[in-house]
Image (cartoon, rainbow, N blue to C red):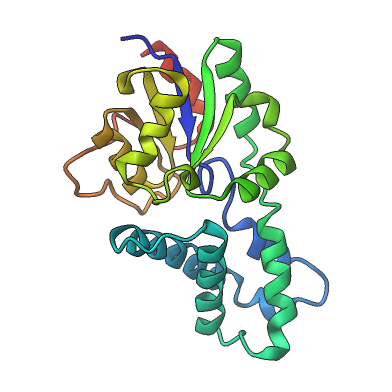
Amino acid sequence: MATTTFVFDAYGTLFDVSAAARELAAEPGREDFAKHWPKVAEVWRAKQLQYTWIRAITNAHTDFWEVTQNALDNALDVVKLNAPEHWELRERLLQLYWELSAYPEAPKALQELKDAGMNTAILSNGSPKMLDGAVQNAGIAHLLDDVLSVEDVGIFKPAHQVYELVTKRFDCQPEEVIFVSSNGWDAAGAAGFGFRSCWVHRNSGEQVDRLPWKPEFVLTDLKFVPDLLRL
């Protein structure tokens, strides 16, 4: 069956989740934070994902903004920057998260897919307002047919109800969809649903997850995604 639709995860795939901490570290007067930003970015992202999984399996859903704040608080605890005198730093990080930078190759890859007549969309754990902020900041709204959020089903990925949002929105079969994610577990979950799955493997030290489902494609960069049209 021919491919009709390309769907992208948002955070870590189209948008650089380390950008908020990295950009804050570069601001004047942030020398103390600059020593800690890589650890903050690492723990913030790890806890963000862990909290979504725990909430999904315990039926304790909340929106992704609350999860993001909880995860940041954990990260700041780790580097001992969560005392009242550091609250301004916390608020600045959260502000920057609404303005995450897109990976530089993302717009061109999306444009090539649109030029080829493909449906394009985001499917994300993010809340609609968060995703709208990121999409508008990146200037890619015109390259997307839709931005789909787990808030429509009230459970985080990799629940099948989330991936089903795509087939309902585009009235298509799972095998018509190529789903692109930089998160190995997400690429696996999408493959388990029936999508043709693509893992954007940005971290060379990370291995394919030992799960029942594997991504059909493994790429190092979004710029190679349009090449999948020829496969």
What residue is drawn where x is 29% and y is 49%?
207
Q: Quadrant of the C terminus?
A: top left
Q: Quadrant of the N terminus?
A: top left
Q: Position of residue 212 (x, y in %)?
A: 16, 42
Report if residue 209 is visible in the image: yes
Q: Position of residue 12 (x, y in %)?
A: 51, 48
Quarter of image, res 113: top right
59 over 114 or under it: above or below: below
Report if residue 25 is visible in the image: no
In this view, the residue farthest toward the left is: 212
36 over 178 or under it: above or below: below
What residue is drawn where x is 56% and y is 40%?
14
29 over 141 or under it: above or below: below
Q: Is residue 67 left or right of residue 194?
A: right
What residue is drawn where x is 67% and y is 40%?
135
Q: How many marks?
A: 0
Quarter of image, res 20: bottom right
Q: Is residue 175 left or right of residue 97?
A: left
In this view, the residue farthest toward the right is: 28
Q: Position of residue 71 (x, y in %)?
A: 50, 70
Q: Nearer the viewer, residue 209 or 63?
A: 63
What residue is drawn where x is 39% and y is 51%?
155
Q: Position of residue 105 (x, y in %)?
A: 61, 33
